[in-house]
Amino acid sequence: MKNRKKALLLLGYAILTFFLAGYIVVPFFNTLIQAFQTESGYGLQVFREYLSNANQLRVVGNTVLLGLTSVLVCGVIGTALALYMTFMAGREKKAVHILLLSPMMIPGVIIVISFIQLYGESGIVTKALEYLLELPEPPFSFWGFGAIVFVIAYTQYVYFYLNVYVALKYVDYSAIEAARGMGAGLPRVFADVIWPVITPAVLTSAVITFASGISAFSAPNLIGGGFKVLSTQIVRSKANNHMEVASVQVVILFAISVAVILLIQFYSRRYGIGVSGERAAPVIPSVKGKSVFLWLCRAVIALQLILIVLPVLAILYLSFMETQSIMMMIFPHGFTVENYQEIFQNPRALKPLVNSVEMSLMAVGAGLLITVPASYLIVKRRGRYDSIVRLLILLPWTMPASVVAINLINTFNRESIFAFQQPLVGGFLILPIAYTIAALPLLLSSNEVAVRSLSPYLEEASRSLGARMADTFRYVVIPNVAPGIIAGGMLVFIRTIGEHTMSALLYGVYNRPISISMVMNMQDYNIGLSLAYGSIVIVICCLALALLCKLDSKRFL
């Protein structure tokens, strides 16, 4: 019986490793081979030609600059917001906290489109200021590097905010009081008491934000202008069927991502940064008094909330306007439901929404099927095979979205043993597979947290009553960790339903998602329909956010 259990376990590991290797490791090596392949064999010729071009070097430099700037700007905003919410927020704390988390729940392409409608050359805010101030031309240009950073700052600060906010719960408030009693000012208290506790969260957030910054596609593509980055150039190379150049760009982008991750990990080990323990005394928010500093902080928070809410309200409002009214009036008016009627009464217009929901659910289902048993075995067994499986599942964490997409193209544009001798490129399944690969690290991390929270006494009681391991897992483990599993699945669903980067590289006739339809309708000046798509996605994501907060209140509330 014991040997049979071991054999079944090894068979399960073999099948899981086979597919993880087939869809993650092998595709990446195929891209490497494509990048180093020359007419006479293999070499660095394509890399030399690419990096000897001043314009291409500028693209690489722009990518690194965007990633570092994203980390700096989002780090300052997110950390400052977390400090305010921990030490100064009052009775409105819960509502403000949920609003501050909301940008994470809205797909980036929708945010970019809403910002264009607000701050673009013909945007509502731009035209209003131009009219009120009687200016001869728009007061600012929402274009290029500054506009990209503005969008990323709006959408990506959440990583810093959420992680630092959770880390601040482990600050020992008695140590803060002691430092204050010894005459230490706020800077010294922050440097000596708070910073050592939140540093792991800051470093983790820096890795995530840098990876998001260098792989950003929607903002550079729609408002980047002459500021070109690798993510947009990869899509252009693929569109022109220059896959050898796209592979080189993917390898460079991957190398940049890995280099920064290794650098941050080296910093963590070099300075002995570890996970903080439990706090001795809880933080007590200080909201009394009417100091200038407190009012200034509240004014900044109010501005941040306006910046968060305004784009959402703009999309919802404009989705009920005719396209002609949106394009010709500063404040469009003339209520209509034609945009929504077009979506729900025209099967062709409804199809992208159905595709996105279906593919996101498929990604969640496949990802949970892989990560739930894997996370349980990794946490409970901690064996050699478990470490290998964990490494394979977490590997996409180092791969920007465009890297995942190009890897799949280079592998599944022909028959493959990993796809049962079928080419996947051009078919429906290629996009949900890409979504699943990108979601695996997030699902594994979420499920590991859920499994670790499970009391071991429950499993021991089940086994002592004679239950088999499979029955214990099915009837004891799964029901008790279900809220954490569902919360991770909901987060993945939110992140994939409006995904744009991989979709731009992999979509076809049969699986065009809603993000592509939004951009295409914008480019065809069918703005009302595009914004109606965005409104529907926002409503779906808001409902998912409410469920997420209820299921995982410890992390999100």
Image: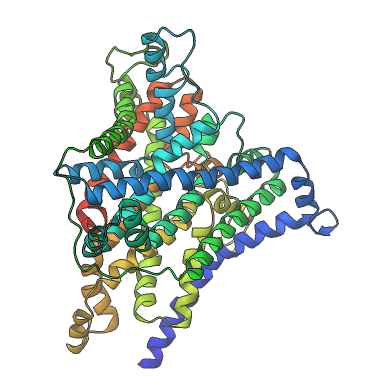
Toward which corner of the image does residue 240 lie, by quadrant? top right
Image coordinates for residue 385, horizontal then vertical, percent:
47, 80
Instruction: Examine the rendered structure and indicate whether residue 79 appears above or below residue 291.
Output: below
Image coordinates for residue 81, horizontal then vertical, percent:
31, 45
Identified at 38% across, 15% down, the residue is: 129
Instruction: Examine the rendered structure and indicate whether residue 430 appears above or below residue 33.
Output: above
Q: Which residue occupies the foreground of this view, 318 or 142?
A: 142
Toward which corner of the image does residue 460 lie, by quadrant? bottom left
Image coordinates for residue 446, horizontal then vertical, percent:
34, 62
Q: Which residue occupies the foreground of this view, 306 or 484?
A: 306
Quadrant assignment for the N terminus: bottom left
Instruction: Examine the rendered structure and indicate whether residue 233 appears above or below residue 124.
Output: below
Q: Which residue occupies the foreground of this view, 303 or 362?
A: 303
Question: What is the count of numbered marks?
Answer: 0
Q: Residue furthest right?
A: 40
Image coordinates for residue 148, horizontal then vertical, percent:
50, 35
Identified at 30% across, 21% down, the residue is: 320
- Can residue 418 be spotted in the picture? no
Q: Which residue occupies the foreground of this view, 396 or 80?
A: 80
Toward which corner of the image does residue 453 lie, by quadrant? bottom left
Instruction: Examine the rendered structure and indicate whether residue 256 appears above or below residue 472.
Output: above
- Can residue 253 be spotted in the picture? yes
